[in-house]
Amino acid sequence: MTEIADERLGGIRLLLKRDDLLHPEVPGNKWRKLKYNLAAAREQGHGTLLTFGGAYSNHLRATAAAGRLLGLRTVGVVRGERHLPLNPVLSACVRDGMTLTYLDRATYRRQRDPDVVAALRAAWGPFYLLPEGGSNALAVRGCAELGAEVGAAADVVCCPVGTGGTLAGLAAGLPAGGRALGFAVLKGATFLDGEVRRLQAAAGVGDSGNWSLEHGYHFGGYAKTTPQLLAFAADFTARHGIVADRVYVAKMLAGIYDLAAAGRFAPGATVLAVKTG
Ligand SMILES: *Cc1c(COP(=O)(O)O)cnc(C)c1O
């Protein structure tokens, strides 16, 4: 845990939880989300993991690394068309032994439909299925451990939100009275509120009701950026010596600074930001 001293934070105390340091190749929330899924895949005797992601998915990359480390075959189902040469994320997946396959966007959106899953089983044989972003009930269970670890240290615990699994687990794991605040990195992703509730229900933890989502800090949408966000991230690194990734962590931090300046946190509150990757 690192304390971020910065006069622009007004009266709040900001702590940074370095979850990015959890594992060198499967960082942060990806490790927490995979942990119980990998154990389940093993218990069920699976030799193959199959999962879904966009072309810049940290989750695909983490799954490929975990597969290599554990001796499991990995199949990555990528949204959209194949572009060569592969980008750095997909190249790293291939180096880790992942087989890449592609689904057009319409079919990709139906990734949970039985006919789509059946076609993948016909093509790739039996596999343990991890949904997009690795967010499922077991991922929520893994992320609940994060809530339990950090909850007592803070009034509000913040995380960036892509598919919602991390926020669902984090909120569920907080001690009584703790609150979680997620920062959506997708534009107009109001469906995420329902998704967090669905994931908590799937994990059998009920609707924890102790979280909310900010939708105003996507900076143009997923993997998009603005000069303002870039300037914020560069300044944060210059002041604190910590690199905040622009897809997720920088958006959350920029949001926290903005809410602090607007007086949206109680005076003297301790706000803990999870550096998820
Ligand atoms: C994947 C990722 C997230 C998003 O987590 P979700 O559980 O999909 O909401 C947040 N931060 C980082 C660094 C990530 O790689």
Image (cartoon, helix red, strand yellow):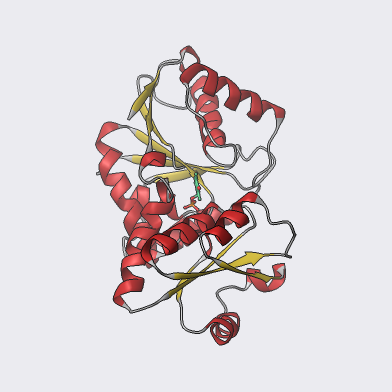
Q: Is residue 174 visible?
A: no
State the quadrant of the N terminus. Answer: top left
Q: Is residue 67 visible?
A: yes
The answer to whether 189 is drawn above or below residue 264 in the figure is below
Q: Residue at x 59, y 73 (%)?
A: 111
Report which quarter residue 76 is drawn in: bottom right
Q: Residue at x 31, y 45 (%)?
A: 147
* Numbered circles on residues, count: 0
Residue 88, given in percent of the width and then of the height, sits at 63, 50
- Going by the image, does 44 lie left or right of 30? left
Residue 29, given in percent of the width and then of the height, sits at 42, 49
Q: Residue at x 70, y 32 (%)?
A: 226
Q: Residue at x 62, y 52 (%)?
A: 56
- Going by the image, does 139 lie left or right of 114? left
Q: Nearer the viewer, residue 103 or 68?
A: 68
Farthest top residue?
Answer: 7
The answer to whether 259 is drawn above or below residue 192 in the figure is above
Residue 40, given in percent of the width and then of the height, sits at 32, 71
The answer to whether 72 is drawn above or below residue 197 in the figure is below
Residue 240, given in percent of the width and then of the height, sits at 47, 20
